[in-house]
Image (tube, grey):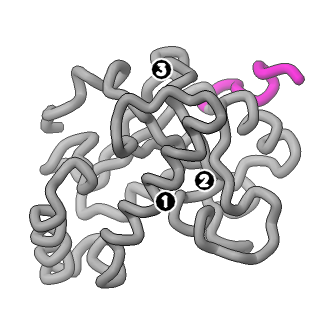
Amino acid sequence: MNPKSVFNGQLRYLFHYYESKTGPFKNLSALTVSEAQHIMKDLKKDNAVFASKRAEDYLLIRFDLEQRARAAFIQKGGKATKQYPHYMTLGPCNWLKDWYVEGKELKIPIEAFNPESLSFTYGDLFPTMRYNDGKPYRGNVYTLSEIQEIIQRYGWPQEWNHDGAHGPERYIEVQVWDDDAIQHYLGAQS
């Protein structure tokens, strides 16, 4: 397998999508449960962004899925220095900008990251870990070398399912388990 055939052009980059007024890498998982619940309540009240449509038990499910993903990643030899990940995508997914009132994107070369701190899901963590349709990539967390094999086998969801017509996988999600490569973005406003 030739990684250059998988990671070419824009697909050599990790992308992060966020609300312009709050800045990048703001993470509900970094908050206490009550702080996160308060933010979710405000989002639901405003009803202006994608997150306002999430179920009442979203936070509990999220925290559980993050811990399951972390454990699976560590089991594969991954290095997770954080209890929760920062979320990015492998390659662009413009649809995610629409989740926000004024969506912004950051584009960071994958080479800026320690590959041992990156896990991947073929699709968003939520449906990947919860959707039970028999697809072989469901319920799995991948390392960098493993996701390259998955991409070669199944292609890029951003290309074959950009509109979501073929299932919930619309991008490859990256879970970043340390702050090293994004340190200077943390706390930044756009």
Q: Which residue carries the number 1 mark?
A: 95
Q: Is residue 5 above or below residue 121?
A: above
Residue at screen point 66% across, 30% down: 144
**Three-letter amino acid code at disc 3?**
Phe
Position of residue 76 in the picture relative to residue 80 (left or right) = right
SS of the residue under disc 2: loop
Q: Nearer the viewer, residue 65 or 188?
A: 65
Q: Quadrant of the N terminus?
A: top right
SS of the residue under disc 3: loop
Residue at screen point 52% across, 41% down: 174
Q: Does the stretch in magenta take in 87?
A: no
Q: Does the stretch in magenta take in 4?
A: yes
**Three-letter amino acid code at disc 2?**
Tyr
In space, the residues marked 2 and 1 are separated at their CA atoms by: 9 Å
Q: Position of residue 10 (x, y in %)?
A: 60, 30
Counting other residues with Cα less than 10 Å from the Cα at mark 3, is it few (<14), some (14-19), or many (20 or more)?
some
In space, the residues marked 3 and 2 are separated at their CA atoms by: 19 Å
Q: Quadrant of the C terminus?
A: top left
**Three-letter amino acid code at disc 1?**
Trp
The disc placed on residue 113 is 3
Q: Position of residue 60 (x, y in %)?
A: 34, 71
Magenta highlight range: 1-10
Q: Position of residue 173 (x, y in %)?
A: 55, 48
Q: Are marks 2 and 1 in contact (CB under 8 Å)?
A: yes
Of the image marks 2 and 1, the number of the one nearer the N terminus: 1
Counting other residues with Cα less than 10 Å from the Cα at mark 1, is it few (<14), some (14-19), or many (20 or more)?
some
The disc placed on residue 171 is 2
- The answer to whether residue 76 is seen in the rendering is yes
Task: Name the main secondary structure of what is drawn in magenta.
Answer: helix
Of the image marks 1 and 3, the number of the one nearer the N terminus: 1
Q: Is residue 21 above or below residue 76?
A: below
Residue at screen point 85% across, 39% down: 152
